[in-house]
Amino acid sequence: MDFYTTPLEKIYKEFKSGKNGLSSDSVKTNQEKYGNNQLKGQKKVSFAARFFAQFKNIMIIVLLISAVISTTISITKHEYSDLFEGGLIFLIVIMNSLIGALQEKRAEDALELLNKKTEPFCKVIRDGKLIKIPTTEVVVGDIVNLNAGDFVPADIRLISSANLKCDESTLTGESHAVFKNADKTLLNNTPLAEQENMCFSGTTCTYGNGTGIVVRVGQNTEIGKIAGMLSNNKREKTPLEKNIDKIGKLITYGVLIIVAIVFVIQLIFSRQTNMLEAFLIAIALAVAAIPESLPAVITIVMALGVERLAKQRAIVKTLSSTETLGCCNVICSDKTGTLTQNKMTIKHVFFDRKMIDNFQDKDNLNQLYLPMLLCNNAKFSDDGKIIGDATESSMLFHLKTYCDDIFEKVNACPRIKEFPFDSSRKIMSTVNKVNGQNFLFSKGAYDYLIDKCTKILINGAETVLSPSLRSEIDKAISHMTKRAERVLAVTMKKVDSEDDMIENGLTFVGLIGIIDPPRPEAKSAIKECHKSGLKPVMITGDHPDTAFAIAKELGIASKKEEVVTGSQIDKLDIKNLSKVIENFSVFARVTPEHKVKIVKAFKKIGKIVAMTGDGVNDAPSIKEANIGTCMGINGTDVTKSVADLIITDDNFQTIVVAIKEGRTIYNNIQKIILFLLSTNLVEVLGIFVATIIMRDQIFLSPAQILFINLVTDSFPAFALGLEPPEHDIMQKPPRNANDNLFSGRVGTSILYQSFVQTMLVLVIFVVGVHKWGNAVASTMVFLIICLMQIIHAVNCKTLESIFKINILSNKSFNISFIGLFALILLVAFVPLLQTAFGIVALNKVQWLTVALASISIIPLVEICKYFVNKWYQKHNLY
């Protein structure tokens, strides 16, 4: 049924309602028949489903396989004490999945709490009584009472209206409030934006009042239809998820190759080894190659990043989204409320032939201020907030700030008549009695009012409006519009009879320049964007001149050629738009469809795009973006449901803070990868080479491998994950989204650092076996690797020289290393632990050898780094 064309009596009959509202029984009946007033949104995921979803990570799958193999080996060999290794790997996998699932659940709970805090109420008539209920309890057939400032709870067919205006920007993208008329007769197929006798769920009343009958609730509303279309889209994998998958595949292939080579070598060269034993030896080496702590460390690092972001007013819904922020290079931002304060403010007035921006001298402005007060329908609520149209509210706020005593004249100057603003006249007028004399006060668009003026007020007296005076006013208009101000003209006229109450023969009083001022912190945030290689883009429905003025003040654009309009975008397809899109920084007069097109064009040229918005009309573009960002204060439930990031203070600065956190997380994950893979390679290469050249000697026992992989690997890795941001992290361009975790010389560093460490421990092992025997040599190798881990982790804090590092800069880093060092000493000296990990006591010479070998890693790595850097410079690879 098209309710905008259906007679009211038929609607009353359909829903068993009337002007006295529904009865209590009808409320229940209609709720059962037509449903609840809640959007389905995205299907709620159970905790169990979240938990098992974490197992889709290829690294987790590799770990599970290694745990199964380790357990199988223990059972096959009847070495049940070794079941501890497989059990511990299973425990790590379970803990990793629990952390990931819990963090995503916490983000969802935070979002639900945010929605509950902002849950609106509405006034309905039931059983003939006006009552206040939560909007979620509204049912089809309810009679709703609407006033300025009220949230429209459902789709409503109007019964009556008085100067009712609604802000439908969240639904249609229309930036100006739309007039509503209950008596309007409409034809079939009238566009949504032109359905004047309807009010829609999710919109807001800004002016006047009205009553209406609820015709659609929940998922059946216009806003619900959009939500339904969005719920089917699948989430695209983030760059980090793709990177982790690649590393998992790399490790898997590496493990398979190692298993094959060692298996073949054991069969060919070792006469005492049968096929099963050769297979078990190969598998044991493969298990040693897997960095068991890597998935858990990465998950915890991202979880801690999410926690830090939450404290800075940014809710991240999925862990991997934190890292995606790090490679963002385009931020598409709404102007209103994000870059600006969403608080219309009077910046200039033109009065008595003077441009004024200092409003302290209120006495000289009283003749301008009185029409601003009386020709105004905004009002103060009981709690002191201003309710009404944004433009009229700005006038009331200005008067409250600079001329508070003028409000005493409201009752002394009663309103006799009102001529409401409409879209054809662009003028609002009221007739008020002032000191016994009737006056017609008008305000509105300058172009419409100035032609109705014959006089001008100068020095308190009326003077003929000459062409030269008109020219002065035009110059004042130009001055204001260049500064992105919306200009209204104010006029007055004495009226002696009702026939004289017409908008003609008016006296020009002055001009009011109103602006939505930029957020103070937005300018510095945009400056930081430019420094860090981010491209900030403003998207607005405003006029191009207004948009450019704000963009210029904020530092987004410097010349008008950087501005493009929606009508110009319409002339280009995605392919052609993507060729020129980098030339523009301001998109004016755009619709929701344009926003999606803009995002697609940027993505087509390989950009990682963050798109901000708050309205339902923004949801498709937010869904399309790599990082969908919704404003938490003004954002609709639909938009929040598809966003990756919720900014709870609606502040552009918070988006930049989130990007900084994303870069820090990625940098720290790279340090973890560098540390874990290079140290794991030492074990693998060491065991591999020792198996070939000294087949009857044990390089490291399973217990020692387990200690290295789960203790000496984990402590430093966690500490590296907690590294604070580097001082110049926001002075570097964003990384390429196609880069992997081995980019930026990380892969090269893993190779040469693992090579140096492997050669060192192999030399010690060979010398140790020949001089002191296998048990001592294996113990020395174990202790050297453990101690080298500490020194190597310090080196992984940066790719620069180790001598440039402030080692004491990270408290958690220092605590973890002191703890790890103490643990290594306990294992080395406590007899019970020595037995558990298969090591023997060393004499002074052996300990001195261990210490010198461990410390020598610093100069050896530095020498390698020097030659690698020289090679990079020679081949221009920086």
Image (tube, rainbow, N blue to C red):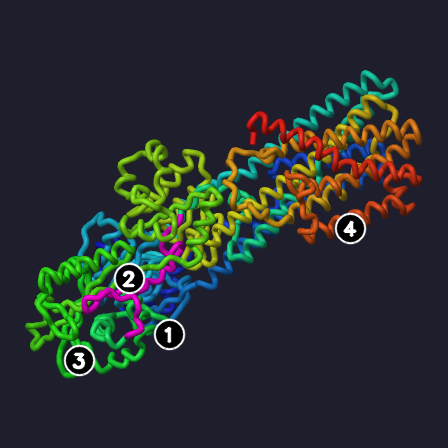
Tag 3 residue: 434
Observer-nearest residue: 760 or 461?
461
Q: CA distance from mark 4 to mark 3?
A: 82 Å
Reply above or below: 828 against 465. above
In this figure, which residue is indicated by the disc labeled 4? Answer: 819
Tell me which label, 4 or 2, sits earlier in the chain. 2
User: Between tags 3 and 1, which lies in front?
Assistant: 3
Q: Is residue 553 visible?
A: yes
Distance between the alpha carbons at the discs numbered 1 and 4: 57 Å
Which label is found at residue 384?
1
In the figure, is residue 43 to the left or right of 265? left
Query: Spatial distance from mark 3 to mark 1, Cα to Cα?
Result: 26 Å
Q: CA distance from mark 1 to mark 2?
A: 22 Å
Instruction: Kindly indicate the quadrant of the structure image that contains residue 776.
Output: top right
The relative height of residue 527 versus residue 779 in the rendered view (above or below) is below
> For mark 2, what is the residue?
514
From the viewer's perspective, tell me whether residue 494 is left or right of residue 481.
left
Question: From which residue to which does the magenta span run?
Answer: 333-361
Q: Relative to 383, is 107 above or below? A: above
